[in-house]
Image (spheres, grey):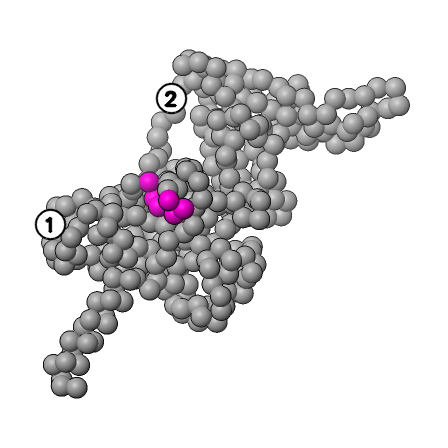
Amino acid sequence: MTSKTLLLSLLLITTSRLLSGAGATSFSCSGDDRCHSLIGYIPPKPTTIAALQSLFQINPRRSLLTANSLPISTPPSFSLPSHSPIRIPIPCLCSNATGLSNHRPIYTVRTHDNLNAIARRIFNGFVTIREIADANNISDPDRIEVGRRLWIPLPCSCDEVDGKPVVHYGHVAAEGSDLESIAEEFGTTERVLMRVNGIQDPTSLQAGQILDIPLPVCSSSINTDALDSRLLLPNGSYTLTANNCIFCSCSSSTWQLDCHATQGMSKSTCPVAKCGNLLIGNTSTTSCGVSSCSYSGYINNNANNFTILTNLTTPTTCNRNEKVPLNINMLIMITIIDANNV
């Protein structure tokens, strides 16, 4: 084989690998569903909250803060270190048994950009050259115009796993990591990771490989007809719901959704959420046992007001002669006031 032939063969192999994107993978997503998913983005250099919000078009900013348990008061200029994963929330759309970020983020091509740099350096290899080219009808991946806006189709999923709701998290396998340790880190099992990712041999894991990790979520008493019925929180995260009136968090110590009234919200904006005299999120110990007031979601009544639902759980009997009803739904109504996007 001549040196020219050898060089050509190496170039063809390299190009094939770049186009196939050994690190990236599509996530299975059955049906026609929408949800929120996550990826563990690793900044190649120090960055800020504002920069990540701009790169991934995250709106409102608080969704980035809550996904990473950062205080809601964290400023846009807050600095984040390089090479440390940060959870990026992405809107997921299932189609043709595959999940892709729902036409976001959009990246504007800059001078000296090429699809390889965009896919691997800017977006961590969560997407391949070919996937970007196909999503944007690019016939020649080597020729992209400066200023062109490209949809970056990030992998995601909305599927339940073993009949349970989860939040799917795209994870970049680090050098020297293995499926067993990754499963332990994220609260799942090696068997589940192998099945979800179609891995036959656990020793075949490669550095930079993108894994679909189903994060377990806290259970809740939110009604199925509530607007936030699909509120799924993995461990170590929180959110604001019911027009920012309710603060909910997830802890692995109980794996129960912990919700209470958001501190600092005006009473003219939010009602006092409670079950009778018991505030939401609180418990009361009586001679009958422990009663608790939990959040059950919210619904819109019309264009001008909404209702917060609470759920009072009490012992089934207080004494031999009196039965106390279980799961009493309480309705709390207030006029909707648009919350400021944080």
Q: Which residue is mark 2?
A: 338
Q: Hey, what amino acid is under mark 1?
A: Val
Residue 291, image x, y percentages = 72, 29
The magenta segment: 96-102
Instruction: Tell me, yes or no, whether the highlighted magenta stretch contains residue 101.
Output: yes
Residue 250, image x, y percentages = 55, 42
Q: Residue furthest bottom?
A: 1
Instruction: Tell me, yes or no, whether the highlighted magenta stretch contains residue 174.
Output: no
Residue 120, can we see it?
yes
Q: Which residue is mark 1?
A: 146
Residue depicted at x 15% and y 76%: 8
Which callout, 1 or 2, points to the residue nearer the camera? 1
Q: Secondary structure at mark 1?
A: loop
Q: Quadrant of the C terminus?
A: top left
Instruction: In the rendered view, tell whether residue 54 sits above or below residue 207.
Output: above
Instruction: Using the rendered view, name the quadrant where residue 205 is placed.
Output: bottom left
Instruction: In the rendered view, tell whether residue 39 sits above or below residue 273.
Output: below
Residue depicted at x 48% and y 71%: 203
